[in-house]
Image: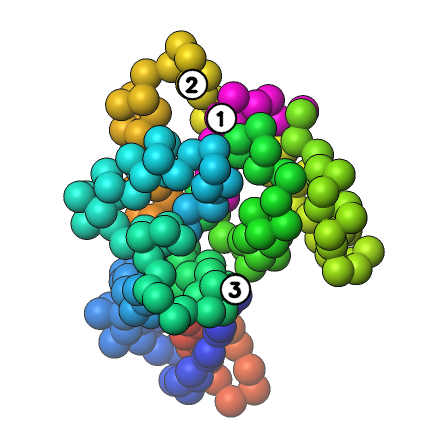
Amino acid sequence: MSVSAMRRVVVPRRASISRVLSNYQGMAAPTTRKAAASTVDVFLSHRGADTKSTVAGLLYDRLAQMGVRPFLDSRSMEPGDKIYERVDAGIRQSRVGVAIFSPRYCDSVSCLHELAMMVEAGKKLIPIFYDVKPAELAIGAAVSSAAESPEDLARYARAIREAKLTVGLTFDSKKGDWSDLVSRTSNVVLKCLKQAKVFIVIKLFAFYEDSGLQIGVALEF
């Protein structure tokens, strides 16, 4: 999303542009504005039966140790929380989403709902293909029968297609190095979070109108 605003200043035709622009010298350099405060930086989507006690839990701990605020259902919710409300809020607040695709991930309506929300919200998506290849991702039979509507199935299919087209990390649980996977994923998350900062860029431009030289200031963020 971009927001722009312009302020005009009228000066004599023979005035020095450099002198006029010098009045805005303090505004010329890009500045940064911290993103709106939230309680979640990264949302971890996973099939609990497959990865909760392995990569999902390890990644949550590593990110928390690095000062990142991760969301993992088994760690981030309290008794009495409404599951879908809390999960949906975590996705909305997050800036990055990690989808841990395990062999049974696409057999879960909840997992595909989370994936669809992350894709639809434009979150930076980091796929981990855990014991599964991207080409193998497909809506499971259980989801096809449990989905509330054809529209939901279409949402899930679009989200899976987006994930397949996104470069991710691959991992073989029988041969892979767990520490390396967690370190690599954490580093990617940190890089994405830095890139997700909101920048305000101030652009100056000049143009003529009948009343004289106009100086425009455009703010984009």
Query: Can you give x and y, in whole percent of width and height, for residue 68 in the image?
Result: 25, 50
Residue at (66% x, 31% y) in the render: 137
Q: Nearer the viewer, residue 73 or 114?
A: 73
Residue at (47% x, 37% y) in the render: 49
**Mark 2 near mark 1, Cβ–Cβ under 8 Å?**
yes
Amino acid of disc 3: Tyr
Tell me which numbered mark, 2 or 1, is placed earlier along the sequence.
Answer: 1
**94 to the left or right of 178:** right
Amino acid of disc 2: Ser
Question: Could you tell me if residue 191 is visible in this image?
Answer: no
Q: Mark 1, residues whose alpha carbon is within 10 Å: few (<14), some, or many (≥20)?
A: many
Which of labels 1 and 3 is toward the front? 3
Q: Nearer the viewer, residue 59 or 145?
A: 145
Mark 3 sits on what residue? 84
Q: Secondary structure under badge 1?
A: strand
Q: Nearer the viewer, residue 112 or 127?
A: 112
Q: Which mark is residue 173?
A: 2
Tell me which numbered mark, 1 or 3, is placed earlier along the sequence.
Answer: 3
Q: Which residues are magenta?
A: 125-135
The quadrant holding residue 58 is top left
**Mark 3 near mark 2, Cβ–Cβ under 8 Å?**
no
Q: Secondary structure under badge 2?
A: loop
Tell me which numbered mark, 3 or 2, is placed earlier along the sequence.
Answer: 3
Q: Nearer the viewer, residue 167 or 77?
A: 77
**49 to the left or right of 28:** right
